Amino acid sequence: MTSFVLVHGAWGGSYGWRKVRPLLEAAGHDVFTPSLTGLGERSHLATPAVNLSTHIEDVANVIRFEELRDIVLVGYSYGGMVVTGLVDRCAGVISHLVYLDAFLPQDGQSLYATGQASPTPAVENGWLIPPIPRRFDDPVEQAWNDARRVSHPRDCFTEAVSLAKPVEEHEFSLTYIKAMLPAAPSTGPQGFWVFAGRVKNNPRWRYREVDCDHMVPQKKPRELAELLLEVLE
Amino acid sequence: MAIYVLVHGAWHGGWCWRKLTPLLRDAGHEVFTPTLTGLGERAHLATPETSLATHTQDIANVLFYEDLRDVILAGHSYGGMVISGVADQMPERIGHLAYIDAFVPADGQSMLELRSAPGASALPPPDGWRQPVLPGYFGVTDIEDVAWLERNLVPQPLRTLSDKARISQPLEARPFARSYIYAAGTDSTPPAPHFTATYSRLGRDPAWEVHKLPTGHDMMVTMPGELAQILLAMTSEALG
């Protein structure tokens, strides 16, 4: 049995993984989908002090208090910032690191510094970034998601991540899963293609593609679960 | 398939359900074990302002964001304070409310008032806002389990214990089912007088179903199999 730790993206929450969790559990695994502070079910805890370090601590503490070992750590979208920030602290318990259509920052880069986010974000109350809307075909699903998508504390996007050495120099396996269809509206200048391009031909990485727009966990849960289980093979 | 939301007690975290959750999941059910703000994996978020209302919102938000219905909502110990408030705010999402050796407050009662151990809470916490972990390990005696608790118990924001429960209607006036599961204790781990009194009172009330297990307070640690059987029986009722 493996423990999957799935880290959601900007403006999201644990709820975004609801269709993936049962599929991994049915395969006999433990699944943890913490909501990051200030988002989803933790939206009542949003303050201007919430930053990338808070979110790294959120997930590091799940690993510590649940006493997890041998984990598959998955970062989706902004979650790529969080899982990268966890590497220095938790490398010893990570067996597989997976980026799902995610930011893949280098040492010293913030999300904005990667150059792949919307360059001129709106700001609410001086510290909250309103969500980029996401499209669902079914109006009921659209309304359900819109009711749960909340603004994101700005300093999560401005704080730099630190990495003592590149992720490729660690022992865990590395996977990048790229969503093939364009996000609407666009995530940024080239979306996540820059990161995909960086790893695609690197033998240290397993590179996979999924026929979906950016909202993979909600729109292609079965295909995603299969790709996540594949890393264990 | 039923949905369980398990709310831990004071000083504990979602981690404390680790022996129980596989037993419910293996029976095909969905299980959520959220950690309350300032405790367990959320210890880094503790502030002097962390309140019973914060904890009630923690759980109410899980029910809303995950869009859970017909929930078997269970609270252990202090968790009873929390689930009482959640059930008052969102009765339409609750199928069964289960108290596991837990506090069952009436409107306006705090946990410190309910706990009939004068002196235990009379000392102000050393830092002024966090109650240190109570000695005694909650009825756990197995040496590995004691070590597990020692690693993971953290101080509890005091305000959560002194805040009064807000309950607009008696629980008995609600349509959901109600159960109390009492830890009757063992020779080496006697029951807590407050929970004994609650069990006796609710046992005489036809609006409640009561159970007891011959073990200490942290029965999810000491008797997870037996506790799972009781919780699983609520499922078949919920499904009619």
Image (cartoon, rainbow, N blue to C red):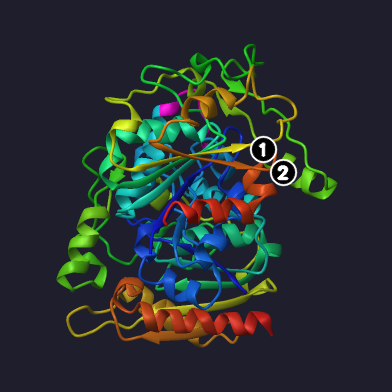
Q: Secondary structure at mark 2?
A: helix
Horizontal and vertical percent position of residue B229: 46, 84
Q: Residue at x 35, y 41 (%)?
A: A60
Query: Which labelled disc corresponds to residue A145?
Result: 2
Horizontal and vertical percent position of residue A109: 42, 17
Question: In this rendering, is residue B119 above or below B171?
Answer: above
Closer to us: B107 or B207: B207
Task: Identify residue type, mark 2.
Answer: Asn
Assign the C terminus of chain B to one quadrant of the image. Answer: bottom right
In which quarter of the view is residue B12 placed? bottom left
Main SS of the magenta part reads loop
Check if residue B206 falls in the magenta segment.
no
Horizontal and vertical percent position of residue A198: 48, 25
Dot 2, how many residues are within 10 Å of its Cα: few (below 14), some (14-19), or many (20+)? Answer: many
Query: Which labelled disc corresponds to residue B126?
Result: none
Q: Residue furthest top?
A: A120
Assign the N terminus of chain B to one quadrant of the image. Answer: bottom right
From the viewer's perspective, tell me whether residue B32 is left or right of residue B68. left
Task: Identify residue type, mark 1.
Answer: Arg
Which portion, as a residue range, is magenta?
A45-52
From the viewer's perspective, tell me whether residue A164 is left or right of residue A15. left
Residue position for label 1: A149
Question: In this rendering, is residue A103 above or below A30?
Answer: above
Whether residue A49 can be seen here: yes
Report in which chain the residue with disc 2 lies. A
Check if residue A49 falls in the magenta segment.
yes
Do the numbered discs 2 and 1 sit on residues whose CB atoms are within 8 Å?
Answer: yes
Question: How many numbered marks appear?
Answer: 2
Q: Residue at x 67, y 48 (%)?
A: A218
